[in-house]
Image (spheres, rainbow, N blue to C red):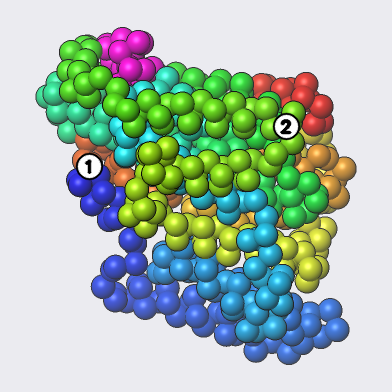
């Protein structure tokens, strides 16, 4: 596990570069452009608070684009900067902490820590491959099967990829698959897709999904329930994941067939019988999932369910987590999410969201397919410049407001945007892809062979399957 943690740290710390001319230029843009914006004379429309909003937000955007400051640091600096420069009051800047989104994220981190520390996550992943089989195609299908099972249970994307990366590396090493070969590239890409595809199916599938729906709630005034989100996305999320697997089958065929069953069976046996903590974790997960699925009936918000479950996990003799694990759960991400969430409401208060949406509405008017595919393409293009978290923080409020002005329910248009920013071509675009690429078993050519066709297959899937499904759900 130390190797995985080390690699994670390397991927998550892009700000340790030496000062090169390129880096100096990036810092000059990230600091100089906001200063230039702040010096624009105010007008009755573009008041000083509006100008300062654009200055602070521009600094955040370019800091995220260039990666010169960690995303988390930018996130927790945003609220105090908005306050200091007179853009918002403390109550407005820190209002996201009063929503359920940070607590959904906290609960997800706690559940992830439980799954990882007890070994239950690894047991589920091994079992999934054993059930499906051990040939090349069956190994990839088994990885996806494991990813689909764990999608609603482990919101931490890096937690999930740590497990599946180890599985992929174990298969490659045990079968002597040459690094850079089609077989090795296919196995590692299968591990990535097992995490990347199913995350869109559930509100607890990834950290940026609660952030997105929390921003939508700021526009609509109503937070979606876990069950509603699953109804809208679980079934089509499975289809989306399977289509990505079929693209992988078609584009990366192994040099020769292999069978990984013996390898995975050996790893599974090493786990031994389920420990007491694993059994506790299984019971807690089952009860938690049952409460999430039935939230439409008992009316208890998902955020309050998850925060109570998190507390139970730390109670001696009942839970499975120790106090020292609290500091290892990635809690700084809560500050990023809450800080990033402040952008939308403050922009809306300043009239920026409505103004930008007003510009987009004429461009997006047309048939349902045209409108939705335009938003999808926008998301795809945006991914060249922003990470999924940053893109979500910056643009979901605008997409939701645009949908309302177009007379469309905001949920499906936001879902469309989310599918757009889930398309990647180069590893640098997404920390999870960069992480698994860093193991050296997958070539850039292999990534391009799979991910470029996936963009077009996803577009067809959205037009022919997702949009009709959302119509069936009463969203269109």
Indicate the quadrant containing the C terminus: top left, top right, bottom left or bottom right: top right
In the foreground, 364 or 51: 51
Marks 1 and 2 sit apart, C-alpha to C-alpha, by 39 Å
- The spot of residue 408 in percent (x, y) is 83, 40
For this rendering, which residue is in front, 87 or 464?
87
Counting from the top left corner in percent of width and height, residue 350 is at: 78, 71
Camera sees residue 412: no
Query: Taking 156 as reference, is 183 above or below it?
Result: above
Residue at the (29%, 22%) spot, across then down: 274
Which residue carries the number 2 mark? 298
Query: Can residue 342 be seen here?
Result: yes
State the predominant SS element of the stretch in magenta: helix
Question: Which dot marks residue 1?
Answer: 1
Between circles 1 and 2, the one closer to the viewer is 2
Query: What is the magenta range?
Result: 126-143
* Numbered disc 1: secondary structure: loop
Is residue 3 part of the magenta span, yes or no?
no
Which is more toward the observer, 97 or 213?
97
Question: Which of the pair 115/396 is nearer the observer?
Answer: 115
User: Left or right: 192 with respect to 273?
Assistant: right
């Amino acid at each position: 596990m130390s190797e995985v943690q080390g690699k994670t740290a390397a991927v998550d710390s892009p700000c340790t570069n030496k000062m090169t001319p390129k880096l100096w230029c990036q810092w000059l843009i990230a600091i100089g452009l906001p200063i230039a914006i702040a010096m624009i004379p105010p007008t009755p429309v573009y008041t000083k608070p509006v100008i300062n909003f654009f200055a602070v937000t521009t600094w955040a955007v370019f800091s995220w684009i260039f990666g010169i400051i960690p995303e988390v640091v930018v996130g927790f600096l945003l609220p105090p900067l908005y306050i200091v420069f007179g853009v918002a009051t403390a109550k407005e800047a820190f209002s996201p902490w009063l929503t359920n989104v940070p607590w959904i994220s906290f609960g997800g981190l706690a559940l992830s820590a439980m799954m990882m520390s007890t070994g239950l996550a690894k047991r589920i992943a091994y079992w999934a491959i054993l059930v499906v089989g051990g040939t090349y195609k069956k190994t990839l299908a088994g990885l996806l099967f494991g990813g689909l099972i764990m999608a609603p249970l482990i919101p931490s994307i890096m937690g999930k990829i740590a497990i599946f990366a180890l599985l992929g590396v174990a298969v490659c090493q045990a079968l002597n698959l040459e690094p850079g070969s089609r077989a090795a590239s296919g196995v590692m890409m299968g591990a990535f897709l097992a995490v990347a595809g199913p995350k869109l199916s559930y509100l607890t599938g990834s950290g940026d999904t609660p952030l997105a729906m929390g921003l939508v709630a700021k526009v609509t005034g109503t937070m979606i329930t876990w069950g509603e989100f699953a109804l809208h996305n679980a079934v089509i999320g499975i289809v989306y994941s399977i289509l990505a697997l079929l693209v992988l089958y078609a584009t990366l065929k192994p040099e020769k067939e292999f069978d990984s069953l013996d390898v995975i069976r050996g790893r599974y046996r090493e786990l031994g019988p389920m420990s007491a903590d694993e059994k506790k974790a299984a019971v807690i997960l089952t009860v938690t999932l049952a409460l999430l699925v039935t939230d439409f009936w008992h009316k208890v918000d998902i955020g309050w369910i998850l925060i109570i479950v998190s507390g139970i996990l730390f109670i001696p003799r009942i839970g499975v987590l120790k106090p020292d694990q609290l500091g290892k759960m990635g809690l700084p991400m809560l500050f990023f999410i809450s800080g990033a969430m402040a952008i939308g409401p403050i922009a809306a208060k300043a009239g920026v969201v409505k103004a930008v949406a007003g510009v987009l509405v004429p461009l997006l008017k047309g048939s349902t397919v045209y409108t939705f595919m335009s938003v999808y393409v926008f998301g795809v293009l945006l991914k060249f410049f922003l990470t999924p978290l940053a893109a979500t923080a910056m643009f979901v409020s605008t997409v939701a407001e645009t949908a309302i002005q177009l007379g469309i329910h905001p949920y499906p248009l936001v879902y469309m945007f989310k599918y757009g920013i889930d398309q990647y071509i180069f590893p640098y675009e997404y920390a999870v892809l960069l992480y698994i690429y860093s193991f050296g078993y997958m070539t850039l050519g292999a990534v391009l062979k799979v991910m470029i066709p996936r963009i077009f297959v996803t577009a067809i899937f959205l037009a022919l399957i997702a949009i009709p499904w959302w119509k069936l759900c009463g969203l269109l």
